[in-house]
Amino acid sequence: MFDVMIVGGGPAGLAFAAALAEHRLRIALVERQPLEVLAQPPADGREIALTHRSMSILKGLGAWDRIGRDDIAPLREARVLNGRSGFALSFASEAAGDQLGHLVPNNRIRRALFETVSGQEGLTLIAGTGIAEVRTDRTRATARLEDGRQIEARLLVAADSRFSRVREQLGIGAQVNRLGRSMLVCRVAHEGDHGGVATEWFDHDQTIAMLPLNGRLSSAVLTLPAADIERLAALAPEALGAELTRRYDGRLGAMTVAGKPHVYPLATTYAHHFAAGRAALIGDAAVGMHPVTAHGFNLGLQGAAELAGLVGMAARRRADIGSHGLLRRYETAHRLVTAPLYAATNLIVGLYTDERPPARLARHLVLRAGARLPFLRRTVSNMLMQP
Ligand SMILES: Cc1cc2nc3c(=O)[nH]c(=O)nc-3n(C[C@H](O)[C@H](O)[C@H](O)COP(=O)(O)OP(=O)(O)OC[C@H]3O[C@@H](n4cnc5c(N)ncnc54)[C@H](O)[C@@H]3O)c2cc1C
C-alpha cells in the first residue's frame, strides 16, 4: 500500500510529488504518457507567465535551476489595449529594474520538474498507463490501472487535467464552460523590439496577445471562434506570419512564424469540491482557469504546495495524511485563493468578448477607470510579483 497516489504527471502532479520529497512517503505517480515523453516533453506552444511566488516555489523544489537561462524571458510590463483606442492600461513594477514575472515554456517547466522527482526516494513512477477506475472508502483509495494492475494508497490526489476523470469517479461535480472559441499560440520572430512588454489587445472580434521572449521573438496568442482558428492553423507558415502581422496591426513590424502553431479549444472549469473522502484535487482538476490572466499553473503550484505542506506536517506528527480535517483545510485555503481570481477572470473574458455597444463602452470605461485608480494597478502588479 502506498501513502499517496498521484494521478497525472503534468506540472501540478510533478510539483506535488516534488514538494513531498523530504517526508519519505511511499508515493505512486501514475501518468498515461510514456516515460520518454515525460522526460523530454515536446514544445506545446504555451509560454507560462510565472509570478514571483511561483518562481520561489520552483526554487524551493529544486526545479528552477534546472531550467536553462535562455529559456527564461523577463516580463517587464503588461499593457492592456481595447478596440481601436490608442489608450493602454499598464501594469509594471514600481521598483526600477524589477520584473513583473518571467515567461518560461511549459515543456521546460515539465522537464525540470520531471528531473527533480527522478530518483526521489520512495517515489514509484508508473508511466505509459493511466488510471481506469478509482474508488475510496474510509481507510484507503483503490485504483485499477488501464493495464489491469491495482494499487492502493491512504490518499489519492487527482492532477489529471481540467476534464478530470478521477474527479468524475469521485462523484465531484464541476462548473464546465465550453466557450466555443479557441486559442492559437505560435512563436513569431519580428522586426521591432518588444522591450519586455506583454500586450493583451482586446480588439473588436478578436483578442490577440504578444508575450515577449528573449531576442526579437514573441509568442503570439490569438483567440477567435473555433472554426476560424482551425482555418488559420492550417495556413502555410508564410501566410500565417502575414495574417498575424496584419491582425497585430504591424505594431512589431513584419512577423515570421518561428515555431509550430498549437490550438487550444477554450473551456473553464471549477470543481464543486476540492476534496472528498481520502481524495483531493489539485491543478486544473480543481480549477481550470481561462489563460487570459495567466493564472492556471501559478494557482496549481500554490495549491500543490499548500496540500503538500499539510500532508508533510501530518506525516511528521505521524498523524493521518488523508484525514477529513486535513483535506477540508486544504479545500478552504485553496478556494479562498482561487474563487475571486476565477470569477474576476471570467468577468473580464465576458466583458471583453462581448461585441454589443454597451459592452464596448463598458470596457473602455473600465480601462480608463483602472488608469485613474493607482491603488488597483498597484494591487494587480503586486499580485503578480508576490514573493
Ligand atoms: C495556451 C495556454 C496558455 C497558458 N498560459 C499560462 C500562463 O501564462 N500562466 C499560468 O499560470 N498558466 C497558464 N496556462 C495554464 C497551465 O498550462 C495549466 O494550468 C497547467 O498545465 C495545468 O497543469 P496540470 O498538471 O493540472 O494539468 P495538465 O497539464 O493538463 O496535466 C494533466 C496530466 O494528467 C495526465 N492524465 C490525464 N488523465 C489521466 C489518467 N486517467 N491516468 C493517468 N494520467 C492521466 C495527462 O496525460 C497529463 O499529463 C496556460 C494554458 C494554456 C492552454
Image: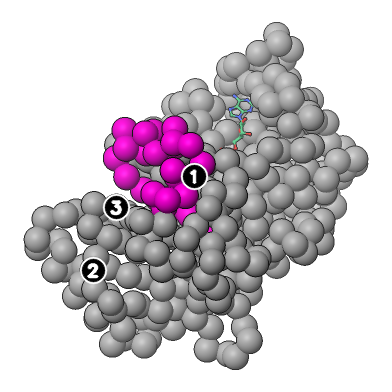
Looking at the image, residue 361 lies above or below residue 261:
below
Looking at the image, residue 64 lies above or below residue 1:
below
Left/right of residue 316 with respect to residue 177 in the rendered view: right
User: Residue 158 appears in which quarter of the rendering?
Assistant: top right
Question: Which residue carries the number 3 mark?
Answer: 206
Tell which circle, 3 or 2, labels the residue nearer the N-terminal end.
2
Q: Where residue 226 sits in the image (x, y, percent)?
A: 33, 36
Question: Which residue carries the number 1 mark?
Answer: 238
Looking at the image, residue 267 lies above or below residue 355:
above
Give the residue type at disc 3. Gln
Q: Where residue 36 sits in the image (x, y, percent)?
A: 79, 30
> CA–CA distance between discs 1 and 2?
26 Å
Tell me if I can see residue 333 in this picture.
no
**Which circle marks residue 84 in the picture?**
2
**Which circle marks residue 89 in the picture?**
none
For image coordinates 44% across by 78% down, the residue present is 91
> CA–CA distance between discs 1 and 3?
21 Å
Asked whether the beta carbons under mark 1 and mark 3 sit within 8 Å of each other, the answer is: no
Disc 1, SS? helix
Whether residue 223 is in magenta: the answer is yes
Of 25 and 297, which appears nearest the observer? 297
Tell which circle, 1 or 3, labels the residue nearer the N-terminal end.
3
Residue range of the region highlighted in magenta in the rendering: 218-244
Tell which circle, 1 or 2, labels the residue nearer the N-terminal end.
2
Tell me if I can see residue 95 in this picture.
yes
> Crowding at label 2, few (<14), some or many (≥20) Cα neighbours within 10 Å?
few
For image coordinates 38% across by 60% down, the residue present is 248
User: Which quarter is ligand 1 in?
Assistant: top right
Give the residue type at disc 2. Arg
> Crowding at label 1, few (<14), some or many (≥20) Cα neighbours within 10 Å?
few
Left/right of residue 225 with respect to residue 290 in the rendered view: left
Q: Nearer the viewer, mark 1 or mark 2?
A: 1
